[in-house]
Every structure is written in C-alpha cells, then in structure tokens.
Amino acid sequence: MSISAIFILVIVLFLLAYQFYGRFLCRQLGLDNGRTTPAVIINDGVDFVPIRPTLLLPQHFSSIAAAGPIVGPILAGLWFGWLPALLWIVIGNIFIGAAHDFSTLAASVRHGAQSIAEVIKVHVGKRGSFLFLLFVWIALIYVIVAFTDLTASTFVAEKYGGGIATSSMLYLLLSLLMGVVIRSGKIPLSIATAVAIPLIVLIIWGGQQIPITLPEISFLNPAKEWGILILCYCFVASILPMSVLLQPRGFLGGYFLYGSLIIGVIGLFFGGYQIQYPAFVSFQNPKGAFLFPILFTTVACGACSGFHGLVCGGTSSKQLEKEGDAHPVGYGGMLLEGLVAVIALATIMIFARGDAALSKGPTEIYAQGLARFATILGVPVEMAMSFGLLAFATFVYDTLDVATRLGRYIFQELTGWQNQKGSVVATLATLALPLFFLITAKEAAYLKFWPIFGASNQLLAALSLLGISVWLIKTGRNPWYTLAPMIFILIVTLWALILFITPWRVTFRPDMNGFVALILICITLFLLLEAYQTVTLYKSKD
C-alpha cells in the first residue's frame, strides 16, 4: 500500500473534523466575535498583544510541537505496529487532543486569559488549584528528564552525534546574538532573519566538520555528561529574560519545524514509498506491557497533550484578537501537530521490520526517514541527516526552555518565593530530580521514564478537561464534549500508572517511577473528589 494514500486520507479526515467538529465546539462554547478579548482590553504591548490568527497560529504551533509527537508515534509504531498508532493519532487528535486545546484556550480567554489553574481555583476551589499546580510541577519534571536524555543520546549518536552537538552549540549562540541584535533596535527583524537563515545552513554543514566529543569521566559516560550540560543550559535559559534567548531561539526553531513539516509532506506525497513495516506487530511491548493502555500513553503528545493547555492559558490566550480565533489556533494547531505525528510514524513505515535503520533510537530513525524524504528535493543525504537531527534537537530545546521556566513559576507560586533568590532556588529544585534520574539511570532514561511521562502528560489533559467541565456545568452548558474525553483519558492513564505500582506486590521494593505514579494517582483522586463536591454543592443550591 502507498503511504501517500494513507496520508491523503488523514488530511481529508482532519479537514472534515476542523470544519464540522471544530465548528460544533465553537457553538457549544458560545464563542462570540462580538465580545472583546483580554488581549484587546489590556493590550499592554508586553504580554497582552492582539494579533491575527495567521500570525498567532504559527507561534502557537511552534510552542506546542516539539519532540513528543515524534518520539511517541515512533516507539508505539515499533512496538505495536503502525496501524494501532495511526488510529489513535487520528481519533485522539480529532476528539480529544484538539478538543482539549480548543476548550482550554476558550476557557482561558473567558477568564481574563488566566491559566487553567486559575480556572480551577475559581470553579473548584483553592485546594483544587494547589493540587493541580503540584501535579503540573511533577509532570514537568518528567518532561525535562525524557527530553534531556533524548537530546543527550542525539549528541552521542554514531557518525553524526558529535557534529550535531557542535551545530547545537552554534545554533544557541546564533540565537543569543539574534536576541541582542533585535533588542538593540538597530536592525529590523526581517533583515536579522534574512542573515540568520543562511547561517543556520552553514551551521548544519559546519557542525559535521568540527564534531564535539566528550571523554568518559569516572562513572559518567558521554551521554550522562551531555545530560548534565543540557540541564545547565535549562538553568540559564530559565533565569535569562525571555527576549534574550527563548524568543529568538523559538523564532528560529520555527523554521526547522516548518522545514521538517514541508519535507515530510513532499516525501509522503511524491516519494512513491510503499509501506513495508507490519500494520500490527504485537499486543505487548518489549517489556511485556499490553497495548491497552500503553499505546495511548506512548503516543502521548501525538494525540493529546496536557502540556498544550499550559501554552494555551500561558501565552496564546493573551494574544487572541477575537474569540472565534480559538478555532484555528486551538483546534487547528493540534491537528497540525497530528500531521507531525503521522510524518514521524511514516519514518518507520518505509522500512521493513528487522531493517538495521530501525535498530537506532527514535531521533536517528526520524532523521533517517526525513533524510530519505529530503533526497527527493536533491538534498545530499549527509546534509539531510544533519538537518533532521539538528531539527529534532531544536524541537527539544523548545520544550526544555518552556518546561523549566514553567516549573520555576509553579514552584515559586506553591512556595511564595517570588524574589530573584526564589527564582534561582525554584529552578534548582525543578532540575534537581531530573539530574538525579539521569545520573542514576542504568538504561536509556527516556525509555525508563517515557511511559510515565506520557501518562502524566495525558492525565494533565484530563485534569484540565475536568476543570473546564465544572465551569461548563456551573454556567449551564453541555459538558459532555469535555467530560467524555476526560473520562476516557482518566481510565487509560490511571490504568497505566497502576501498572507502575503493581510490581510492589511481588518485590516489595517500590522504585521511583512507582512512587511518583502513586503520588499522581492520589492527587488525581483528591481533585476528582473536590470537583464532585463542588458540582454537588452547586446543584443543591440550584
């Protein structure tokens, strides 16, 4: 079967979903372009800045699309086959992931562009908001662990790893220089971009000419050493003003994202590739975990992501010019991420099972597939591989920057330490556990922590939908389009977390993943109880 036929079908389904289900959600949420949004009301030129959806969508998309929709589909496809992964990506995006992003963005706008934690505080209570923030902080730690290890493994990959490490360092330096130039006000953004893009091409090529390799030190192998250095980068990036590094790096990273998406679309449409990997492989992954529920938590961000809700309520809602713009930005943005996930899945579908190309990690598999697609455009394989690996690294930087900064914000809010010293302590506290996990892990840390990362991330989406459902109930609107996906996600994620605890019955030796899983389950149950009591009290007064 041709991959292009499947890709066309996915695009058609996404377009139909956007047109019909997306508009249905618009009506259910009562979006009204006649209502003035917080971005227009406040418009302070700093955080609240109304912009057209054609400009906001790319910014929002580059913030939510990172390594998650690449790694998750590849792992799920390798373990269970491409068909189960593809079905969940499509169905999950349309009815759960996109609905979550859309409703979270709309709820934030209706609450003064505040975060979902504030929405929960208003409608569930302060205790519920505290529990939600605690859950988010723990979930962010697992985001940092998984993505730091993935980047470190990219830097030690055979043949290309050292060169990608060099290119990454040069890319971050370029981002810093671009930030300085833009802040000076002497050079327009258009000119700075026109200069930066060719330099990125030079960086991709030049990195392979001067690869960086780290020597093994004591009990630390090069991958762990890179992990420590990346966490140091996370510390600095979290403390620096956003305009110095995060914004210019995110702006440049957008070009990698769109370039990868365009190359993937061209490869799938015009490459003439046939599907070689089996549609179904097994009901169990290599560690014996069953397809249900592990498939859902493994695909993770490729179908649904609670992290997106933090972006929706953190930055995107403060820039929405009209309420109706939540449709293309929230719902449409997640469907675009679904396309990224399908392209990532296609990078294993073009190889036969047992092919040496599939023995590598997800980063190299993705880069190899992208390189094949790029050769259609006449790009040399070596250059295409370097582009794919560096693109993956830049996607991870997007996530690490935001996750560490959000972790700092939440820790400061939980503790009340809002001064500069508090910022440093909060960042160190957020990075301390990832550092411990990475150093003590005996295997690839992302493989050990990805399942619980996926579960916590999707459970975060369920808790966001819980808060939105309470809001809808209290305002007399139909809550089922948020309640139904919330219930499904709750079932699969809690089931997955319970699997981390069950080995205790045999060994009586709980590990860190099992301990964290138990904490997340307890927080979730307490939040569900708080929400139930709130709704019951509201209805009794009605």
Image (cartoon, rainbow, N blue to C red):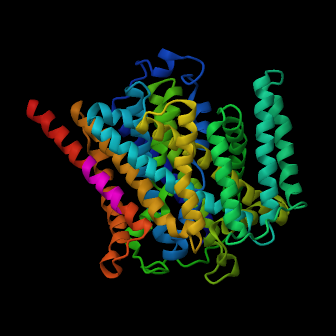
Where is the N terminus found, in terms of image quarters?
bottom right
> Can residue 89 be seen in the rendering of this structure?
no
Magenta stretch contains residue 525: yes
Left or right of 164, for residue 40: left
Residue found at x 73% / y 60%:
389
| Res. 518 in view | yes
Where does the image place residue 15, in percent across and percent down from the top left? 50, 47
Q: Is residue 44 above or below residue 404?
A: above
Residue 526 location (% of width, % of height): 25, 49
Q: Which residue occupies the foreground of this view, 168 or 97?
A: 168
Please give the name of the residue rendered at 35% of the width and 56% of the height, measured from the top-left corner. Answer: 520
Residue 98 in picture, x, y percent from top left = 44, 46
Numbered range of the magenta stretch: 518-527
Position of residue 507 relative to residue 255, above or below, is: below
Which quadrant would the C terminus be assigned to in this image? top left
Where is residue 197? Give x, y as percent. 82, 42
In screen coordinates, is 5 left or right of 484?
Answer: right
Q: Residue at x 30, y 45 (%)?
A: 466
Left of 478 or right of it: where is 80?
Answer: right
Residue sitting at 50 percent across and 65 percent down?
449
Residue 221 counted in the magenta span: no
Front residue of 291/493: it is 493
Residue farthest to the bottom, as pictured = 354
The image quadrant that residue 190 belongs to is top right
Furthest toward the left, the residue is 540
Main SS of the magenta part reads helix
Q: Residue 346: which quarter of the image?
A: bottom right
Number of numbered discs on residues: 0
Residue 439 versus residue 299: which sits nearer the camera?
439
